Each structure stands twice: as C-alpha cells, then as structure tokens.
Image (cartoon, rainbow, N blue to C red):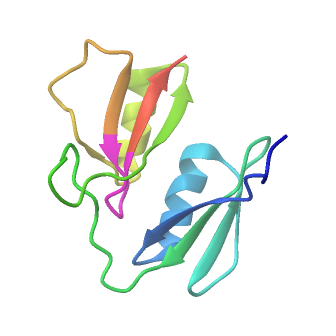
Amino acid sequence: MALAELGVVVLDCPDPRALAGFYAEVLGGTVEGEGDWVDLKVPGGPALAFQRAEGHTPPEWPRADRNSQQFHLDLTVEDLDAAERGVLALGAKPLDADDRSRTFRVYADPAGHPFCLCAC
C-alpha cells in the first residue's frame, strides 16, 4: 500500500510564467496562475508547477561534482528530428549536440533544467 500519491512535480526557476509557457508549447495544456507559483495542467498527464526561486542557478549537465542536474524530465516523441526543431525554436539549448546515435537527446529548457526527448 502506498503512503502517498504524487501531487505535482515542481520546477524552481526565475520566471514561472515564462517556463510554464515553454512547457505548454512542448506538452500542450493550460497555464494557470500568476506570480511566484504557476501550474501547467497537462491533458491526460500529471500537472507541472513552476515556482519562482530568487537567485536560481541552473543545473549543469553532466556534472557529478557540483550543481548536478538533480532531476530531469523524459518526454516521449514520435519524431526526434521534428521535436528537436520545435524545442529549439522555443528556446531550448542542446546539451548533447554531437551524439545522434541514441534514441534520446538531451536539452536544457530556458531556465536551464535538463530534459530528454525520447523516441517511442
């Protein structure tokens, strides 16, 4: 028996509304709220929340010695090339631009959080 149920995944960032907007373009859904806390209601999936963190320092990928990624999102896509073009147009930065042999690719969102596009 579970002790708890997952409520929401929260990403710290300097601008919650902007980062929620980025993920709304990637995943779909509705951005709700203003100020220091903004929710993204994703159809058919768990919600994401974005919390203002003053002095936010983006994680570094890959780094084990300091300021490591701490977590990342895996986003499943049908067409890696098309999805890559889309996230780059929205402001994502590639973190593994040289390796296209794998079934996943790693990026940083506009606030610096790592995420992967994974072929289904």
- Which image quarter is the C terminus in? top right
Label count reads 0
Magenta highlight on residue 88: no
Side of 52 relative to 84 (left or right)? right
Q: Where is residue 66 in the image (x, y as percent from the top left)?
A: 17, 58
Q: Where is residue 6 in the image (x, y as percent from the top left)?
A: 73, 53
**What residue is shown at x 58% (from left), y 87% (from top)?**
35
Side of 83 relative to 54 (left or right)? right
Name the magenta segment's main secondary structure: loop
Q: Position of residue 23 (x, y in %)?
A: 54, 54
With respect to residue 29, does 77 lie above or below?
above
Side of 42 relative to 96 (left or right)? right
Q: Where is residue 56 in the image (x, y as percent from the top left)?
A: 32, 76
Task: Give the residues in magenta.
Answer: 107-114
Query: Residue 49: which quarter of the image?
Result: bottom right
With respect to residue 99, does 37 lie above or below?
below
